[in-house]
């Protein structure tokens, strides 16, 4: 909690003189009056403790898209009964210790470009950890899957080029290849369908 304004001292319910102040609660986004000794020590105005006691609330993320992404990562890597386990945990792909808890994962995601509609991309054979993951569009993520073949990429380049909306250089930049390779693909010199 952040101190906003000191108030004058007054007697508390036990008839003792106490200093009071107004604090800002970062959890429920409200101002709250507390004893100055309490406000500096507390992380919330009491809202978090109340919710934990009443509802089992921990972080407010349950049911969100980001929370479900995090649950999916853990399931693929840690749950041997998951349908995807053989492609992830079964291949030795792990979740870093930090991301075993939702809040550190959420904080990393928000500070590294997470937005609705984006998917997490993990570098091939890398673990789920901050330096080997990033947020990408569904189209970009499909391009990186093990199932995507060179022929599929070549066909996508041909389709995009035929729209007339992209130059060969723009496609080269988009697919991280040389412009000459795009030229060969669009002229059906390599990777013919």
Image (cartoon, helix red, strand yellow):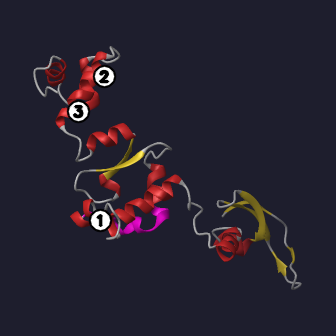
Residue at the image position 22 percent from the left and 56 percent from the top? 125
Task: Point out the tag, 3 or 2, that comes first from the N-terminus.
Answer: 3
Callout 3 touching callout 2 (CB < 8 Å):
no
Q: Secondary structure at mark 3?
A: helix
Q: CA distance from mark 1 to mark 2?
A: 36 Å
Q: Which callout, 1 or 2, points to the residue nearer the camera?
A: 2
Magenta-drawn segment? 93-104
Q: Which mark is residue 83?
A: none
Residue at the image position 62 percent from the left and 73 percent from the top? 56
Q: Is residue 105 above or below residue 182?
A: below
Q: What residue is shown with label 1?
A: 94
Q: What residue is shown with label 2?
A: 160
Residue at the image position 60 percent from the left and 62 percent from the top? 60
Residue 67 is a magenta residue: no
Q: Which mark is residue 153?
A: 3
Residue 95 in the figure: left or right of residue 176: right
Task: Point out the tag, 1 or 3, that comes first from the N-terminus.
Answer: 1
Task: Point out the tag, 1 or 2, that comes first from the N-terminus.
Answer: 1
Residue 129 in the figure: left or right of residue 70: left
Q: CA distance from mark 1 to mark 3?
A: 28 Å
Of residues 122 and 75, the one nearer the viewer is 75
Report x, y in % for residue 145: 26, 46
Q: Which callout, 1 or 3, points to the residue nearer the camera?
A: 3
Report x, y in % for residue 96: 34, 65
């Amino acid at each position: 909690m952040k101190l906003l304004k000191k108030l004058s001292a007054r007697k508390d319910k036990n008839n003792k003189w106490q200093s009071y102040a107004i604090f800002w609660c970062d959890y429920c986004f409200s101002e709250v009056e507390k004893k100055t000794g309490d406000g500096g020590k507390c992380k919330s105005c009491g809202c978090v403790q109340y919710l934990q006691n009443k509802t089992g609330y921990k972080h407010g993320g349950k049911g969100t898209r980001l929370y479900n992404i995090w649950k999916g990562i853990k399931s693929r890597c840690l749950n041997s009964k998951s349908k995807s386990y053989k492609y992830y945990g079964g291949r030795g792909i792990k979740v870093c210790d930090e991301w075993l808890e939702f809040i550190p994962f959420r904080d990393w995601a928000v500070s590294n470009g997470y937005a609705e509609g984006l998917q997490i991309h993990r570098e091939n054979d890398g673990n789920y950890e901050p330096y080997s993951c990033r947020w990408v569009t569904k189209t970009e993520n499909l391009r990186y899957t093990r199932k995507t073949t060179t022929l599929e990429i070549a066909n996508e380049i041909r389709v995009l080029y035929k729209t007339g909306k992209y130059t060969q250089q723009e496609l080269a930049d988009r697919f991280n290849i040389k412009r000459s390779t795009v030229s060969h693909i669009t002229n059906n010199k390599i990777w013919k369908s």
